[in-house]
Amino acid sequence: MQYTLELLKVIEGALSNNLTQVTAYSELLASKLEKEGDDRSAKSIRKKLNSLSTQYSTAGLNGQLEPVVPVDKDSRLTLGDVLYPTLDGAHILLPASIQESVDEFLSFISKAHLLAEAGVGISPSMMLYGPPGCGKTQLAHHIAAKLELPLITARCDTLISSFLGSTAKNIRSLFDHAASRPCVLFLDEFDAFAKARDDQHELGELKRVVVSLLQNIDALPENTILLAATNHQGLLDPAVWRRFAYRLKITLPNKELRCCLIEQFLGDFCPKNVKRIADATEGMSGATIQQACKTAIRNAILLGQKQIDIDKLIIGLSMEQYQDILNHSELSDEDKIIKLRMINSKVFTIERLSVIFGLSTGKISTLTSNKDSN
Ligand SMILES: Nc1ncnc2c1ncn2[C@@H]1O[C@H](COP(=O)(O)OP(=O)(O)OP(=O)(O)O)[C@@H](O)[C@H]1O
Ligand SMILES: [Mg+2]
C-alpha cells in the first residue's frame, strides 16, 4: 500500500501516546492525498485533526496544524525555528563534485525504504563544513525544500543552556520533537557545542553534553534527516564526525562558480564582462559577493543606470573583503594602502586606491613606489 509508512507512524504515535507524531504524520498523509487529487479524504483527515487539543498552533504552511517546538525551561526561548523553505528562496550554486554528493544524498533519502528492506539502511545525516559565507545554511534550506519537508533549525546557543544540567534535557526534547514529525533537523553553528569549552561550563558538564548529543544522534529513527553545519571543523570531536554518514566540505567558489554567482546576484543589471569581476573576487565567499552585488544594484538604480558599474563593484567587493584592514583603527591610511597593494596589486590599482582613500593618483603612486623601492 502506498501510504504504509505514514499509517505506521500514526499508529506508532497513538500507541506511544505521542500526539505530535500522530498529528504530524496525519498532516503529511493529508497533503499527500491532496496532491494526488483526493481532496475529500484530505479534508476529513484535517477536520479530525482540527478537533484535536489546543497544544498545536496553526502557524504552519497553509494554516496546517503545527506541533509546538519545545522551549528552554529557564529562558523560555524556543529550542528550534521551523521554516518551510522553497526552492526559489533557497537557490544554491555548487561545484559539480559537491552537487553530485548532494544529489546522491537526496536520492538515498528518496530510496531509503528500498535500502532499509535490503538491511543496509543508514541514518540520513550530513555534516556541512567550510569557510563562512559559502552557502552551508543555504544548502540546508535547499535540501529541505527539495524534500518538501519543514526545516527545524536548532538554536545551538539556546540548546546549551546557561544553567548546568539543562543542556542535555534541551537536546533530548528537541531530538524527541524532531523524531516525532517528518522534518529535517538542522544543527547550525554546530561548533557552539565545542566552543562551550571556553565558557563557564566545567569540563565534566561539557563531556556530558557531548555524550548526550551523541546518544541522541544514535537514537534518531532511521528516517529522520539530520544536517549540521560548522565553520570550525577543527574543534569537533572525532566521535561527532563518525555519526555523520556524509561529510561535505563546502569550499570557496572557484572562478567558474563566481561567474555564475555574479550573474545570478546581478540579474538584469549584469554587464557582459563578468569574467573581469570574477578575476577580482578570488578568495571571496558567495556571501561577500552577494553583499557587494546588492550595493551595486542599489547604486545603479539610484543613478538610473541599466547595468552596474564594473569598477565600482570591484571597489565595493574589495572593501567588503578587506573590511578588517580598512577599518583597522591602529593603521594609518598610508599603511593600509601599502598593505592592500601588497595583498593584490591587480585588484588594488592606483586608480581604485585613489577612489577608496580619496587621495590623488599621484600621491598613491608615490606612496606605493616608495615602498617598492625600499
Ligand atoms: N554557493 C552559493 N550559492 C548561492 N548563494 C550563495 C552561495 N554561497 C553563499 N551564498 C549566499 O550567501 C548568503 C550566506 O550564505 P550562508 O549563510 O548559507 O553561508 P554559511 O556557509 O552558512 O556561512 P556561516 O558559516 O557564516 O554560517 C546566502 O544567503 C546566499 O544567498
Ligand atoms: Mg551558516
Image (spheres, rainbow, N blue to C red):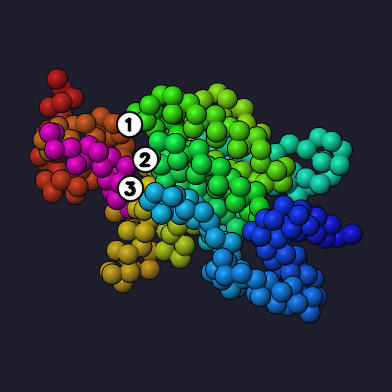
Q: Please, what is the three-letter code of the amino acid marked with disc 3?
A: Leu
**Dot 2: what SS?**
loop
**Dot 1: what SS?**
loop
Q: Quadrant of the N terminus?
A: bottom right
Residue on which the image places disc 2: 162
Mark 1 sits near ligand 1, with its Cβ under 8 Å away: no
Within 10 Å of disc 2 (Cα), the crowding (few <14, some 14-19, many 20+) is: some
Q: x, y percentage for residue 292? A: 34, 53
Residue on which the image places disc 3: 317
Q: Is residue 155 magenta?
A: no
Upstream in sequence: badge 1 or badge 3: 1
Q: In this view, does 304 lie to the left or right of 220?
A: left
Upstream in sequence: badge 2 or badge 1: 2
Dots 2, 1 in contact, CB < 8 A: yes
Name the chief secondary structure element in magenta.
helix
The image quarter in which residue 266 lies = bottom left
The one nearer the camera, 34 or 303, is: 34
Tell me which segment is drawn in magenta: 313-331
Q: Can residue 256 be seen in this view?
A: no
Residue on which the image places disc 1: 200
Q: Please, what is the three-letter code of the amino acid marked with disc 2?
A: Ser
